[in-house]
Amino acid sequence: MKKTTPYCKSLYQYSRRKTHPVKMGTIAIGGKVPVLVQSMTTTRALDIQESVRETLELQDAGCDLVRITAPGVKDAAAFAEIRMSLLEKGSMIPLVADIHFNPAAALEAASHVEKVRINPGNYSSAKVVKSDEEYRAALDELEKNMLPLLTRCKQKRVAIRLGVNHGSLAPRVMERYGAGPIGMVQSLLELIEVCRKHDFHDIVLSLKASTPRMMVTANRLLAAELRAKKWDYPIHLGVTESGDGLEGRVKSALGIGALLADGIGDTIRVSLSEAPIQEIEVCKAIKDTVEVLITKGKMPTSKPLYNPYNYSPRETERPEVLRNAPKGILGIRYLLIDMEDFAEDIQDMGFMNGPGGEYKPGPDVPDFVQIMLPNATRKEIRKIAKFPFSPAQRRRILVPVLSDEEEEGIAQRHVALDGSWYAVSLVSDTLPMLSLPHLRKLLNKYHPENTLLILSQMLGGLGEQRYAMHRIMKAGSKHTVLHDFSLFLEATMLERDGESKMSTILSGLQQIIEDREEGIEEDSGQLPLLEDESLAIVSHTLPSGCMLLDGLGEGMVISEGHADQGLALLQACELRRVKAEIISCPSCGRTLFDLSGAAQAVKQHFGHLRHLKIGVMGCIVNGPGEMADADYGYVGAGPGKVSIYKGQKEVRKGVSAKEALTALEEVIRENGDWEERDEKKE
């Protein structure tokens, strides 16, 4: 599969991918229609009353279309009654039938819904084929099996979502194209070819994986292939089995948001192991953050110095203090207003986490703190230097350098309290203004062995940040680079009625100072910007994540109070393992036990095993395949029953859900992967 065609027009300037609208009842996906939000009920279609209730609840929350699982033909037929009940209640929201393993159910559902979601693995043989002749025969079989559904959908004007999941590729595809992004794209292209052969074009495409990098790479490859072929089908985006809580939101935001920011995607779903209604606010947060992040102004056109289809980290040097830190570095940006709170704030940020208040480096604590001082003076800096910090802490706490040598508006240095290394903040908006020789001269002033760079975004967006990174790479720099979108986000989210972003930064900063002087303690030294939890999580992680996902940087700086979000992002980017990686699917009508409760219990009980990846799956549909790279699995096997997996092998079958945690721990212990929890850190 050649990758000569770019997946988008420009990496530096936003342009939404052009698609033709696929109609679904009263709405359409693609074309000039804004990105639509969808979710899925926890019911099966046979549970008509509850399916209707959940559908209306999702619609009221802002959902544009709703998916309901139909395991059998009777479920598929029940959509007729669901639709009638919704119409009686004044709802015309489009319905999507979710079909697995049962082409007959898809055929029945096509008579009652606006879209049918199918998996190509259910329409072709599971056999591995070796010869080209056998492969062609398998494609003929795929076409034969799909033809009745295409005919029915064309007659009824029903759309089809062709959904390929990383964990459910046909063996023949994996044998020939591998089990990665290329195999995923090829599997989908085969389905598209069948549809096109029979002049069926009301299709929406979907490539999903449980890791953001895999999902993003696959969709970029797909977009490039579609662009090369001049095919304009809409694309649905989602990170499957993303989990719950903070981690689920961060992984979903990273995968979906990175693609939306490049103009790819026409409908989205966040797959959380929580109540479906919780997914809607996260979808809205992703859309809102992308809207302020994209670069709409004119930008230079330059060929990227990295491969967007194949992650490859830059060759860099690090300051000695950070050489044993994880691949993904986390710094905390701390706005110091009140000296009386300084020591307590440092402790809250994790810099007194060891015995006797010492700093103990680790993957679950930040690597340094960058102190920001409004109107900094040498007197204030001397006050900080006099605090009785240990040598380890003094190496991790950085204060501003007050020097006439700083380049006005471009670079600002911070130095560790022990003087051993520096962090230089560069305003990325200004770098394109510098000639390449000027930029090289500036960077050469700071040696990468004792200085890291912090690329701060002020007034631009993702395009400007990428272009600034492009310039740093073109200058030949080997500096470790971290991304800081704090000021950009604070300014953007605070922007009101045409105020400039810089004025909102200054007014917000002034308000904090005034509040502190009046003894108001509600804020925590941050600009008062985000009350919505999902928006706070997404906006503080997605911008830096878009850069790190491509290897354009080695970490991030995040505002005080958001360290847990930064750590979750670095883990989602596969740059830092903070806790056990939990892969858990959203609950649906196929799940026969309390999936949400199980996912939370597994996270709590096994979260300290950061070297492991554990899958929590509601049923066999999202079972071994979807947790293909998991070390262990907790998979629904029937009403109140769970099977325990070691890798892809089922080792305990039909365990009571009440005893499943104990059984999983026993299996982990038997295989030598158990570690006792460090109670001192709890």
Image (cartoon, grey):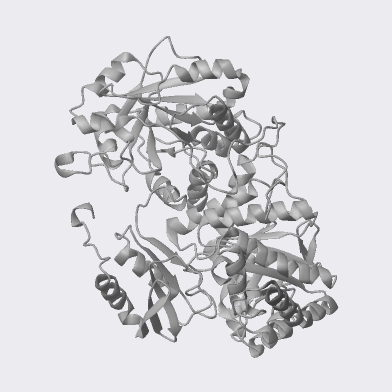
Regarding residue 432, the answer to whether it shows in the image is: yes
Q: As rendered, which of 46 and 351 lies closer to the eye?
A: 351
Residue 644, given in percent of the width and then of the height, sits at 37, 78
Identified at 79% across, 55% down, the residue is: 229
Q: As rendered, which of 644 and 142 lies closer to the eye?
A: 142
Residue 366, given in percent of the width and then of the height, sits at 33, 41
Q: Is residue 464 above or below residue 8?
A: above
Query: Which residue is most to the top?
Result: 404
Regarding residue 523, the answer to whether it shows in the image is: no
Q: Is residue 495 above or below residue 265?
A: above
Quadrant, the C terminus: bottom left
To which quarter of the image does residue 336 belong? top left
Quadrant, the N terminus: bottom right
Identified at 40% across, 85% down, the residue is: 640
Residue 170, given in percent of the width and then of the height, sits at 60, 73
Identified at 61% across, 57% down, the residue is: 218
Would residue 578 appear left or right of 489 to someone viewing this image?
left
Q: As rendered, which of 429 and 67 lies closer to the eye?
A: 429
Q: How many marks?
A: 0
Residue 460, given in percent of the width and then of the height, sits at 61, 32
Identified at 55% across, 32% down, the residue is: 469
Q: As rendered, which of 356 and 360 lies closer to the eye?
A: 360
Q: Is residue 374 above or below residue 136?
A: above
Query: Which residue is most to the bottom?
Result: 74
Q: Is residue 393 above or below residue 439?
A: below
